[in-house]
Image (spheres, rainbow, N blue to C red):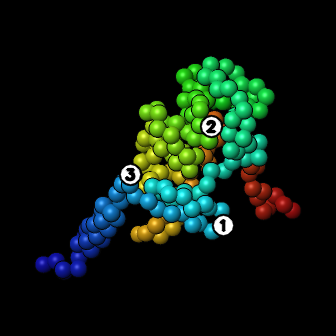
Amino acid sequence: MKSFLDKTFIDRFIKAFAILIIGYSCSNYTHDENKTEYSDYQNDSVKTNLEIAVSPPPFSDEYIFPCSSCHEYQEPNSTRRDLVDMHDEISREFNHDSENRWCLDCHDEIQRDSLRLASGKLLRFEESYKLCGQCHGDKLRDWKVGVHGKRSGEWNGQKHYLLCVHCHNPHSPKFKAIKPSPPPVRQEDIF
């Protein structure tokens, strides 16, 4: 007769317990469009009414934000073209389905400080993950549950997410090749 604490029984019990814990934590994840969370992550966050607590977008020095500071004095032009002057660098590096995409597929033509979904709904830049999720739904799903991207916070409480644009250039999202480092020197080759 086998012992009650047989190794097979213990292994099965541990696996079942782990599945229950994972299932419970996943079942507590709900997507509620009306849910409001506030980000307060050290000194680099701005409090915003967002569905998910995120860091502010990483606007670099070469991009002037708010966009309306320049565009409010310019007549909107929705003609697809190569950009010049302030946006020529973006135009040169743009490689995000560039055969089918153009600036106004993501940026709003009239309200320049907003992004625009395919439905026409306007988004703040802090909600850019929704824009990315229109085409990259699997990545958005993985990002929300913490499998893709970076998040911090409590395992069973409020979490704080980095946006897609913290790691990916929105105009050219594919990571650039990295030159490998030389191999380590063997100790016997030092002397």
Instruction: Residue 145: give x, y in percent of width and height.
Output: 42, 55
- Please give the residue where the numbered disc 2 appears in the rendered image: 112
Task: Specify whether 34 is left or right of 148.
Answer: left
Closer-to-camera residue (178/171): 171
Residue drawn at x 77%, y 42% is 62
Mark 2 to mark 1 CA distance (whole Å): 27 Å
Residue drawn at x 51%, y 67% is 153
Tag 3 secondary structure: loop
The quarter of the displayed image where residue 3 is located = bottom left
Instruction: Residue 31: give x, y in percent of width and height.
Output: 36, 54
- Please give the residue where the numbered disc 1 appears in the rendered image: 43
Asked if residue 127 is positioned above or below residue 82 in the image, the reply reads: below
Farthest residue, direction front: 73
| Res 25 seen here | yes
Instruction: Residue 54: give x, y in percent of width and height.
Output: 54, 57
Q: Earlier in the sequence, mark 3 or mark 2?
A: 3
Mark 3 to mark 2 CA distance (whole Å): 24 Å
Q: Nearer the viewer, mark 3 or mark 2?
A: 2
- Please give the residue where the numbered disc 3 appears in the rendered image: 33
Q: How many marks?
A: 3
Say what amino acid the circle numbered 2 marks.
Answer: Arg
Task: Specify whether 75 is left or right of 114.
Answer: right
Quadrant occupied by the C terminus: bottom right
Farthest residue, direction right: 191
Quadrant occupied by the N terminus: bottom left
Are the two marked residues, 2 and 1, in contact with CB atoms closer than 8 angstroms? no
| Res 164 seen here | no
Residue drawn at x 61%, y 54% is 56
Mark 3 to mark 1 CA distance (whole Å): 27 Å
